[in-house]
Amino acid sequence: MKMYRDLAGKCAAYDERIHVRQWKTVYVSDFSIDKPATWRLIEPAGQEEKHLKREKDGDKHVLIVDMTGASGALLALGPEISGDFAIELQAKQVGGRVCDLSILTNGIGRGPGFQLGGQDNTQTILWNYVDAATGAQDGTTTANSVGGAVRIVPQKWHRVQLGVVRGQMQARVDGQTIRTMACGPARDPRASLQPIFYTFGSKVAIASVKVSVEEVVRADVDADKIWREIFVDQTREAASTQLAELTQLLGDATPATRRLASELLARAGRLAIPALEGSMENGVPEEQARARRILEGLDVKDLKGKMKDMSVTED
């Protein structure tokens, strides 16, 4: 397997040099009165006129979310996102219950999410994907209480932030990191997430919202020159052939070989995508399932084939 180890290392080095990560703002709103609404109530659905209004607060344009005497509001903000992201909002509690200035994705109790001032300002909670050690199925979440470490101060503007970067989730309030923790293995970076503001029985003013995602883009470099520096005399065609050979080992009868092939292909990264997609099309079931798992880890958004029910043999 030495040849494949060397190949995976070269592929990883090449990929790192020809790509860069950069942040892109996909949604921003200062709630100016003269701009069209780019938000909507998920709950209570269709009651924007009753619970939402724009007004001025000093020099700020704000969106008032008034749930006084009612229950919770789930306010969708901007488009759905996926992958690594950062959500930031500036808001304050101005009336009603002091309960929740929270950032959620897809809904209450579904990670990742940051519940600030929950349970009438007694709990601060990170909603994260469940640890595989619990045996729970993918898609479930778990609440991680950080107690009363930080609370809502009525009439004070708070800057609330939630981000997921490189598999780590971080929550911040007013520039202070509240907690950083690893996302559970159930997290699928390809899954669509709807940024949501949540409050309960409260009257809140929101002054601004910003949603950003991290993208991997091609760097402005001489890719052919970098290839020659790393691969020397090996052609792209020869490397592609070896990667295709390595994908066939995903279906090997030996567990250790299957496991090592998976690790090497994951390390090879984007250069392995065509070979992995070929395995999904033409490989044996075990090879197809493992190829899909690796592609999911590489954040390939449009997987070929429909194999959601396939499972990987435990090694």
Image (cartoon, rainbow, N blue to C red):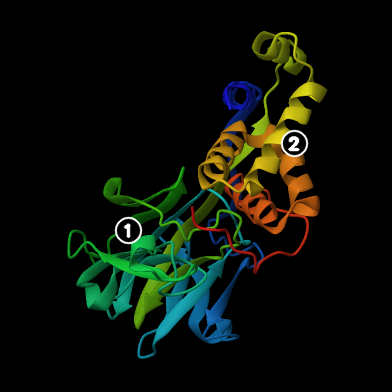
Q: Quadrant of the N terminus?
A: top right
Percent x, y of residue 191: 59, 60
Q: Position of residue 204 (x, y in %)?
A: 38, 72
Q: Nearer the viewer, residue 3 or 55?
A: 3
The residue that appears at 31% across and 77% down in the rendered structure is 95
Q: What is the spatial separation of the Cα atoms under label 2 and label 1, in whole angstroms?
A: 56 Å
Could you say whether the residue bearing mark 1 is in a helix, strand or loop?
Answer: loop
Q: Is residue 98 visible?
A: no
Towards the viewer: 135 or 258 = 258
Instruction: Tell me the residue at 65%/69% (across/down).
Output: 309
- Residue type at mark 2: give it: Ala
Assess disc 2: are there few (<14), some (14-19) or many (≥20) residues with their C-alpha within 10 Å of its C-alpha. many
Give whichever of 144, 310 is nearer the camera.
310
The residue singled out by tag 2 in the image is 244
Left or right: 85 with respect to 8? left
Q: Is residue 241 something one can see in this rendering? A: yes
Mark 2 touching mark 1, by CB under 8 A?
no
